[in-house]
Amino acid sequence: MGELWHRHLGVYGICIRNNSILLVHKQGGPYENRYDLPGGTVEPNESLLDALHREFEEETGISIKVVQNLGTRDYVIPYRLEKRGTTHIHHIAVYYEVEYLSGELTYCTDMQNNDSSGSEWIDVHSLSSENSSPLVIHAVAWMKDMNQQSFEVARLNNWTAK
């Protein structure tokens, strides 16, 4: 059987404070049981920036200021979605640099409408591909080499969901 991709478009924010990055705890999907960037699906009749602000509020409880668009990167990841009959996710991630404005981090209680269970500031030195999504790994690399990161497709053939 050949590959059948499910395409997912999401918008994500890189929010840095005191050498820590704001991350969410994924409870579903291919990044389950790993850290991920706050963000997610752009809903119908919603702009990218509106989706980013909404997702930050839903997943973290904080308000942000968008600084700049960093680019788009797509990931091809083995992940079976039985209900769709697909073998891979083609995850298209639009990255933004954002700044914290206000609010307190919250724990998500609405798991039916959210696949993240909470958020926290994580020291970048504790992150690896074992505990983080490829989006987080790309964000950390971007932090180290501001504006020097490739946004070409990343094919992660050996990725496994936890």
Image: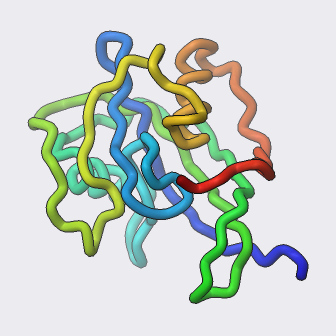
Q: Is residue 47 above or below residue 134?
A: below
* Position in image of residue 28 (x %, y %): 43, 62
Q: Residue at x 76, y 45 (%)?
A: 154
Q: Residue at x 13, y 33 (%)?
A: 102
Q: How is the image coloured?
A: rainbow
* Position in image of residue 20 (x %, y %): 35, 18
Number of disc labels: 0
Q: Residue at x 89, y 78 (%)?
A: 2
Q: Residue at x 59, y 23 (%)?
A: 142
Name the quadrant containing residue 14.
top left
Q: Nearer the viewer, residue 92 or 136?
A: 136
Name the quadrant containing residue 106.
top left
* Position in image of residue 12 (x %, y %): 45, 46
Q: Nearer the viewer, residue 130 or 54?
A: 130
Specify the farthest residue to the front: 162
Q: Nearer the viewer, residue 72 or 60?
A: 60
Residue 74 horizontal side relative to residue 114, left or right: right
Q: Is residue 45 above or below residue 36?
A: below
Residue 84 horizontal side relative to residue 99, left or right: right
Residue 118 horizontal side relative to residue 155, left or right: left
Q: Nearer the viewer, residue 156 or 146?
A: 156
Residue 126 horizontal side relative to residue 153, left or right: left
* Position in image of residue 110 (x %, y %): 18, 67
Specify the farthest residue to the right: 2
Quarter holding the N terminus is bottom right
